[in-house]
C-alpha cells in the first residue's frame, strides 16, 4: 500500500502544479478575478465578464515532463481538450500530440502552459506575436520564462487575451515581504 506522503516523495509537486494550472486556466477563462473585484465593489456586470468554456479548446504545453504530462491528462479527460506540446525530449507514451517546433504549438493553441525548469526566456516578443489574440498564457513554472515587458505590451495592445501565473521573476524572500516584480 502506497500512502499519499510516499507519492509526494516520488512525484514531488507534480499533481499540485498540474491542478493549480487547471485552476488558473478556469479562473482566467471565466474572469473570476475581475468578476469578484467588481462584485465586492457593489457592481454586477454579468455580460462583460461572461467568460468562455475550455471544453474542446486546444491546450499547448511547452515542457512536457511529469507536470506537463499530468496537466495533459487532466485537460483531456476532464475537459475534452486537444493537447499539443513541444519538448526537447518528447515522450510518445504521454498522450500529447507533439509538434515539431515550439512555434507550431504557439500558433495553434488557445492556451499555452509553460512547464520548463530553466531560467531562460521561453516566450518573448517573437513568440507572443505568433499566438492568436484570443489565446491565454499560463505560467506555473518560472517567472523568467516569460519576457515580462513583451507580455505587458502584448496584453496592452490586445494581442493576447490574458495571462495567469503564480510565479514572478523576483519572488519575495520571506513571507509578508513586498513584491519587487
Image (tube, rainbow, N blue to C red):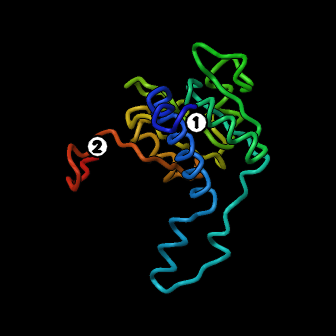
Q: Position of residue 17 (x, y in %)?
A: 50, 40
Q: Residues within 10 Å of mark 1 (few under 14, many from 20)?
A: some
162 to 73, vertically: above or below: below
Q: CA distance from mark 1 to mark 2?
A: 27 Å
The residue located at (63%, 23%) in the rendering is 86
Left of 14 or right of it: where is 93?
A: right
Q: Position of residue 147 (x, y in %)?
A: 42, 36
The residue located at (51%, 42%) in the rendering is 16
Please identify the residue farthest to the bottom as the structure is shown.
Answer: 42
24 or 135, which is in the foreground? 24
6 to 175, vertically: above or below: above
Q: Secondary structure at mark 2?
A: loop
Q: Are marks 1 and 2 in contact (CB under 8 Å)?
A: no
The residue located at (63%, 29%) in the rendering is 69
Q: Quadrant of residue 82?
A: top right
Q: Position of residue 133 (x, y in %)?
A: 64, 47
79 or 84, which is in the foreground? 79
The residue located at (73%, 47%) in the rendering is 78
- Which numbered marker is on residue 171? 2
Q: Secondary structure at mark 1?
A: helix
129 to 100, vertically: above or below: below
Left of 21 or right of it: where is 46?
A: right
Q: Position of residue 96 (x, y in %)?
A: 71, 26
95 or 130, which is in the foreground? 95
Identify the residue position indicated by label 1 in the image.
129
Left of 177 or right of it: where is 20?
A: right
Q: Quadrant of the N terminus?
A: top right
37 to 28, vertically: above or below: below
Q: Which of the two labelled residues, at mark 1 and mark 2, occupies the earlier sequence position?
A: 1
- Which numbered marker is on residue 65? none
Image mark count: 2
Please identify the residue farthest to the front as the structure is shown.
Answer: 1
Amino acid at each position: 500500500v502506497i500512502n499519499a506522503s510516499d507519492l509526494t516523495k516520488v512525484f514531488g509537486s507534480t499533481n499540485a502544479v498540474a491542478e493549480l494550472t487547471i485552476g488558473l486556466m478556469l479562473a482566467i477563462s471565466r474572469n473570476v478575478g475581475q468578476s469578484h473585484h467588481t462584485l465586492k465593489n457593489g457592481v454586477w456586470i454579468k455580460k462583460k465578464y461572461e467568460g468562455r468554456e475550455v471544453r474542446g479548446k486546444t491546450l499547448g504545453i511547452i515542457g512536457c515532463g511529469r507536470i506537463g504530462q499530468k496537466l495533459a491528462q487532466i485537460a483531456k479527460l476532464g475537459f475534452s481538450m486537444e493537447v499539443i506540446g513541444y519538448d526537447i525530449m518528447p515522450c510518445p507514451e504521454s498522450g500529447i500530440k507533439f509538434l515539431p517546433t515550439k512555434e507550431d504549438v504557439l500558433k495553434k493553441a488557445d492556451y499555452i502552459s509553460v512547464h520548463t525548469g530553466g531560467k531562460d526566456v521561453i516566450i518573448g516578443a517573437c513568440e507572443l506575436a505568433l499566438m492568436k489574440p484570443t489565446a491565454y498564457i499560463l505560467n506555473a513554472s518560472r517567472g523568467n520564462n516569460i519576457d515580462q515587458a513583451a507580455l505587458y505590451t502584448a496584453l496592452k495592445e490586445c494581442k493576447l487575451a490574458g495571462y495567469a501565473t503564480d510565479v514572478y521573476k523576483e519572488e519575495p524572500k520571506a513571507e509578508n515581504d513586498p513584491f519587487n516584480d
